[in-house]
Every structure is written in C-alpha cells, then in structure tokens.
Image (cartoon, grey):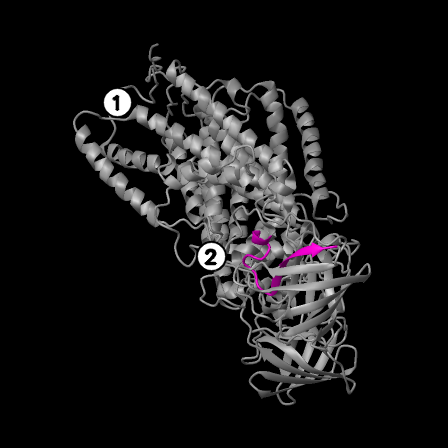
Amino acid sequence: MSLELTGNRSELHRATAGEAAKPSGKAPWTTFQKFAFRIGFVYFVALCIPAYGNFYRDLVKLFDFSKLTYHDFQAIVAFWPPQFILIESEEGVFGIYNYINLILLLVLAIAVGVVWTVLDRKATSYSKLYYWARVLVRYRLAYGMVGWGLKKAFPMQMVYPTLGMLNTPFVDMAEKKLYWSHVGVSFGYTVFLGFAEIVPGLLLLHRKTASLGGALAAVVCLNICIANHAYDAGVAVPAAYFALLGLFVTWYDLPKIWALLVNGKNVAPYRYYPSLTSAQQTVRTGLKVFFNTVFVPVAAAFWAYGFFNGNNYNIPSTPGLKNIEGLYHVTEFRLNGKELPYSPTDSIRWHDAIFESWSSLSYSTNRGALVDRMIGYSPLRVKGDKGTSQYNQVNTQDSDELFKKSQNRDLGVTRWEVGGMAGNRRYFFYELDSTEQVLKLQNKNRNHHNETQSLEISRPTTDRVILSGLNEFRDSIYVVLDRVHKHYPLVDGRDHERQAY
Amino acid sequence: MEHTTQSVSHPWAAWKRHGFRFVFIALLLFIIPIDGKFYQKLFSINWADATFYDLLVLTKYQPQFFPPEQPWGQYLEFVNFRNWLLVALIALVGATIWGVSDRGRRQAYPRLYYWSRVLVRYRLALGLIAYGIYKVFQLQLPYPPLSNLLTNYGDFYAWKIYYQTTGISPNYETFLGAVELLAGILILYRRTVTFGAGLALGFLGNITAVNFYYGLGEASYSLLLTLFAAYLFVHDVPRLYQLLIEEKPALAEQSTSALSGNTLILKRTAQFLVLVFVVGICVKAYGGRHPAAYKLPQTRGLTGAAGRYLVTEFVVNGDTIPYSRSHPFRWQEAVFEEWSTLSIKSNRPVTIDKSNGEGYHEKDIDRNYELAGISGRHFYHYEQDTVRQQLRLQNKNIHHRGEQFVLDYQRPTDSTIVLNGRLSPDDSVRVVLKRIDKKYMMYEGRRRPVKI
C-alpha cells in the first residue's frame, strides 16, 4: 500500500470543453452548446424584460420626485415574467397553472433558437453574449431580491397580529394569513428573513460573488415558492422565476465547482470578461454606480422613511380615540329599543367589540360576510385588470394612491387587518365628529364597503363606551361596552411570570 | 495506510495547530457519549418494542452535566449552554497540555483532521436523517387537533403558533423533511460533503434562528448541528475562494488512496450500522402511524361524537345559567376530539403547560401536545363506560390534575349530548351540547367567493 503520489502541483490541466455545458474562454463551442445557448439566451433575456405596459407607466412615475414612495421602487423591481395566458381555477390566476407562461416562453425561445441556428452558421462561440446576458439577469435578480428583502427588513410585509387577530380563532384565518402572521409574531425573525433575501441580492451585484449570490437566491426562492404553494400566498410563480434566474447565474461556475469538489480535478482560471475601451469602461462604471445607488441605498431609504413615518402598507395610520384600545364585552344591546340577550347564535347582537390603537372598531356576530380573500399581489394587479376575471379581487392595497390623492390612506391598508379573516368579525374604519361626538364608521371589507354606521359615542368611565345610533342596516342600536383587561400569552411570552390566563 | 489531504511534510500555521487541538477535543466531547444518561437510555430500550422517539432521543445526544435552566428546566428539553462552557474549558485545558507535549514534534495533524471530519459527518448525517424522517412522516408537527384550531390566536405561545402553522400543511412538512434527508445523504457520500454541508448550513441556520426567536426548545441542539455543518463546509472554502473570488488556479483535494485493511472494515461496519439505523427509524416512524404518532392520544373517543358543540343549556344546582361571555365558569363551547379528549372553553383560568409537548408518553393522559403552550380552554382525558353510559374525566393539564369528575351521558339525537353529574362535591350540573356544523375558510377552496 503506498501513498498515491499527488499530481505534480505545478502542472494544471485545463478543464476540457466537454466538461462544461457552456464553456467560456478560447475553446470553440460544440454544436449542442451553441444551440442550447441560443435558446437559453432568448429565454433568460426575455424573462428579464418587462412585457406589459403598466411597467413603463410605473417607470415614468419614478420621475415624479415629490410623490415618490417605496411602492414606486417596488413596482419597478418586482415585475412578472411575460404573461401569455391567464388560466383561472381554484388556485386562481396566480397559482400552479400560471407556470404555463414560463413553459410557453420556453417554447417561443426554442422556436427563435431554431431560426437563429439556421441563420447563423458562422459563430464559433457566444462568450460575449453569455457575459452580457448574465449581467442583465444578475442585476435584475439582485434588485428584485433587495426589493423583496426590504419589505421584511423594515417589517411591513409581515407585522404583528392586530387585537382583532389575537381574538380570532386560528381556523378563522386563511392559510396565507396564518403563514404571514406566524412570521410577523417575531419582529426579529422578520428582519432576519429580510436579510436572507437582501444578502444574496448584494452578492449578485459583484461579478466575483455572483455565483454564490445566485445559488443562495435560488435556494431561498425555491423555499418561498414551495411555501407559497402550500399556503396559497400568491407569489409562487414569481419566486420560481427568481429561482430560475439564480440558477442561470450560478450555472456558469457550476461545472467548474463540480470538477473541483466532486471530481477532484485542479481547475485553471476560466472566466471570460469582455475587453472594453476606456470610454466604455467609464460608461459601464457610471451605469453601474447609478443603478446600484438607485435600487439599493436609495430604495432602502424610501422604505425606511415609509416605515418610520406612518406609511407602513399594512398598518393604518389614523390614530384611534385616546386610550380606547382593547377588547370589550357587550353588557347591553338594544335593537330598535328592544334588549337582546347574548347568544352565540345571534347574527345581529354584537358578541364583543374591539377597538384598535388606530381608528378601527370591529365586532363579531354569527353572521358571515363575503370574505376578502386577500388575493393581493398578482399578475392582474401588475398587468392591469380588465375586470373579466371570475376570481377578480379588488385591489385592497392602494394606500399610496389614496395618499397621493390626499385621501385618507387607511381604507387602502385593509389587507392585514381584514384580508384573509372570517367575515363574522366586521371591521369598521371610523372618524370622529368631535362637535357632535359621533363616529362615522365605514366597513373596511371592500366586498361590503357600502355598509356605514353613524353612532354617537360617550365614555362615562375609562372602561365603558356607550354607542347609540344607526347601524349598517338602518336599525337603531344602543350598545354598552365594558373593557376586559385581558392578557394574551402570545404578547406576554413564555418568560413572563404570569402563569394563568 | 491512511491518506492525507496534503503531503506529509507540509506544516500547518501555528493558529491552525492550536485551533485544531481545541476543536478536536471539543468535537470528541460533544459527539462521543460520555454522559451516563445516554447509556442509561440506550440500555433501557426494549429493542423489540422500541418506539420512534426512543431512537430519536439517541440521535439528539449532547453532554448534559448541567441540568436544564429553571424555569424551563422541568418543562423543556432546553439544554443548558453551561454544558458548552464546560466542554470549552476541558477542551482548552486538554489542548494546552497536548500542545505542550507536542511542541517541536508535530507540525500538522492531517490524519486526525481526516478522522474528525468522518466523525462529524456521521454524527451530523444521523441527526439530519432522524429529524428528516420525523418530518417526512409528519410526526414532529401533527395536524392541529380541532380544539387547537378553535383557539384564539392570542392564546398561543409563539412556539405553538409556529408549530401549528407548519402543521396545517403536512405536505410542506414532508418537503422540509425531504430537504433534511437530502442534506444528510449528501453528507454521507464523501464526494458531495460540501454540497450537503452547505445545504445543511442554510437549513439548520434557519432552524436555529427560529429556535431563538420563537423559543421552540431546541436552541442548543440546532446550534450544535449548525456548527457541525460549518466545520464540514470550511474544508473547501479556501479552494472555492481561490476559484471564484481570486480567480486563480484552484487545487483540488489530493485524491485519496482506497482504504484497506482494518480501516476498510471499520468503514463498512459504520456504513452498515447507519443503514440499519436509518431503516429502523423509517419502519418505526411509518409502521402503524398511530402508535408512531405519539404526540396525540391513541384511545378512540366516544363513537361518532367528534366535533364542536354549542352549550345550549347549562344548569348548576338547579339554576339555569344563560349564555354569557363573562360568567366565571359557564361552559361556552365544548369539543370532542377523535380520541378520548374533551376540551371545554370557559373563563376559568388556565395555568399554561409551558413544556413543548415533546417526549414519549405511554398513557393518553400524559400526551400533552394538544394543550402545551395554549390557554383558553381546559382539556380533559376521559374514560368511557359504554355500559353505564358514563364518562370519567380528568384534567390533562399537569397543573390541574386534581380536577376529576364523572358525568352520565345521553345521546337523544346524532348531534345532541346531554351530560349530568357533579363538577365537584358541591356542584351538580346538567349540560346540553348541540353539535355545530360550521364551514371554515381554509376548507372552502382558495379563490371562489365564499360567505363565512
């Protein structure tokens, strides 16, 4: 038995062209490699170019500097891949059937690839095109990942459960809602996940760390994609799309990594960089610095500004009445003068009421409502909704547009508080007319936005609220609410000395 | 003859020698069982009758000389980080002595390094595979019982929210288990160790973060496995750095000669044992899902009674108490589970079971996963006497075990149950329960308009 002599360290064998699917450098490409590249080039470049008008409309909005918010940046970096057909089903326009668009694009790419092969007989390699395709893809992915990550690094996408949610049974929340809430329960973990998306994005911006960034992005986005399918969270296809982009970025270095680690072969430097004139270098550096600045620190600044200045897209910003927040029992309830006793089967008499710290009053009864399914982000929203979809859900996330029109943004921030929640609890936005001491209430559920109430409010003691007036059915009601000083295990945490709840 | 990663004469830098001596001893202390409790457990297992959990516990070994911290201690499997401090101290002392005795003689430890990697690979793979199987067969995060689904969101501790949210998607749980299995398998194959370690690093890193943020109870074990994965991964970092960042020629690991003789026998034996163990836990995890699904009680409940019930009548000592949200003890809702548990929602305070519901319990009354980490209702284990039509109930919560009572039941219709008995020596009670058949959003499709 002898120690096998190591290869002569000074001799390095070049990686053979056959080892890589898409080799770089000076070796000529095989026919298969050229054909595969043509298809891949068309496919990935097409994936990275927005194919619908609304994107360009939103791009123009970026120049309206006085009204810029983080939404405008997000609309730019979070664009969808080309949508050829929208197939509706229980999974909606947004679920598993949407993959057909990624497949159709591939078919198109193959067709173009065939034509290209016929027309272009002379090319020996496509190193340059490969390089530039990879630049496009990695910048697109980087800005997308950073954008997605900023929503969590400044927690807006997932926020802490509202008082209404704390008093809602687990099963009365949509799976999507449950998935987001369970992250939102921990502020620290939400920020951690935000960085799990931002860091791969940043790595993608530098050409030497791009493959690492691409691999991390692919793995993170694959998990997001599977979780989205499992919980119906609505961005499964965009996540899969990002994972594909990450794979494409990593693919360049993958054969070499495999050769080095798995096959145990020494590897010579192999990367291709185009030679640029000094004028071209300047342009390149300028563009790079400009876009990196706009889509990383500037975007982050806008998210930070929104987060710290009452523009959290999931939290209303109109403050509620002073010291009114809490859960209230309904001690007395009169409908048109007649007192109704409490019964869990009653569909009119309020079972309880909750005031939030923002201007929201909710109450539960045994009457259902057309549920706001919290459809949220979808190709319909991005591409433009023609209203022909059967499963169309009106956009409930238009706080920025309302704000820009100087209207109260709260009615556009209902997705967290109301979306994905069973309809037996009704959430009303209120405004106080202080001269009359009357609350004007409006149902936050867009499916029932016509329901308004006008209730006179009095607060005889700190823990008692009396409301009387006309409810949403034009009946007169008289409600006496008494606050419950309730403690929630979720809020207190297990470390708290309190044992009994 | 063993192989080396570098030629024999290549010395290591001083920091590397010092560091390795420390890490090597620490690894031995963490991996090779020196804690008597491990052997107690090992020899107490009845191998013919072993449960999945018995085997899982063996793979979770860590030295535990310090007891778990109060107040978690009696409740959780939270391993005290003071054990790590002790290991570090011993390793420091040991490494110093070793360093002194080796001074001037040994310039590198390629063989020991190789064997340390083998040890860590098998240890980590075992841990990953055990937990992977645990999830693939959906045992770790059971589908939430109805009582838990009906509990208010604010009445959960954070860990239970996390477990329950993952539990409502059994397929996602299986996917997560498959990822762990894949990482474990990649680590077992020498050529794919770095890929497996990288995958494990990401997966376990996330689990460790969740443990710290949500208090799942496995903070030190998950961190330990993460560190094992990092130890395996760093092996290839220098050459990857050369290849990808410095864009210099990168040198592969010198190819190793085939093992022979005693080491080959050792290797084959280890592989065989691992295979036996893996097959064994798969069988235990699958074979007879219900005995394997130890977190939930096994005794069947009252026939055809499972469901959610409205308490339409509640009479105590002859006084009818009407519906009320604020009454101190009137039952508001009752749930019969598929197994022999009845949960009752009322305003009676619950002293929360702060454990995380882990552990194998033979008796149903001790299987506390369904009530661990939540409040809002009391959970009663019941024994049914179908002849006399009686239920003997006992509160399952470890803090309320003293609460026991007997109720006679009658079932006038399919969806009505009338209970009569005494809640305590002073209080007679008559309760009429009517089953509610309610629709819940998550079972009513995902997109179609629904009024709920």
**What crowding class fits label 2: few (fewer than 14 Cα within 10 Å), some (14-19), or many (20 or more)?**
some
Residue extending furthest right?
Answer: B413
Q: Position of residue B393 (x, y in %)?
A: 64, 60
The answer to whether residue B135 is seen in the rendering is: yes
Q: Residue at x 56, y 58 (%)?
A: A158
Q: Which residue is mark 2?
A: A188
Given residues A221 and B432, the one toward you in this image is B432
Callout 1: chain: B
Q: Are marks 2 and 1 on the same chain?
A: no
Q: Position of residue A117 (x, y in %)?
A: 65, 23
Magenta span includes B367: yes
Label 1 sits on what residue type? His
Q: Position of residue B87 (x, y in %)?
A: 31, 42
Q: Quadrant of the N terminus of chain A?
A: top left
Given residues A185 and A205, the one toward you in this image is A185
Q: Is residue B171 left or right of residue A288?
A: right
**What crowding class fits label 1: few (fewer than 14 Cα within 10 Å), some (14-19), or many (20 or more)?**
few
Residue extending furthest front?
Answer: B388
Q: Position of residue B380 (x, y in %)?
A: 62, 60
Q: Which mark is residue B334?
A: none
Given residues B433 and A193, the one toward you in this image is B433
Magenta segment, which residues? B365-386
Q: Which residue is mark 1?
A: B10
Q: Quadrant of the C terminus of chain A?
A: bottom right
As displayed, is residue B164 above or below residue B412? above
Label 2 sits on what residue type? Gly
Callout 2: chain: A
Residue extending furthest top?
Answer: A1
Q: Is residue B395 left or right of residue A12?
A: right
Distance Cα–Cα, label 2 vs label 1: 46 Å
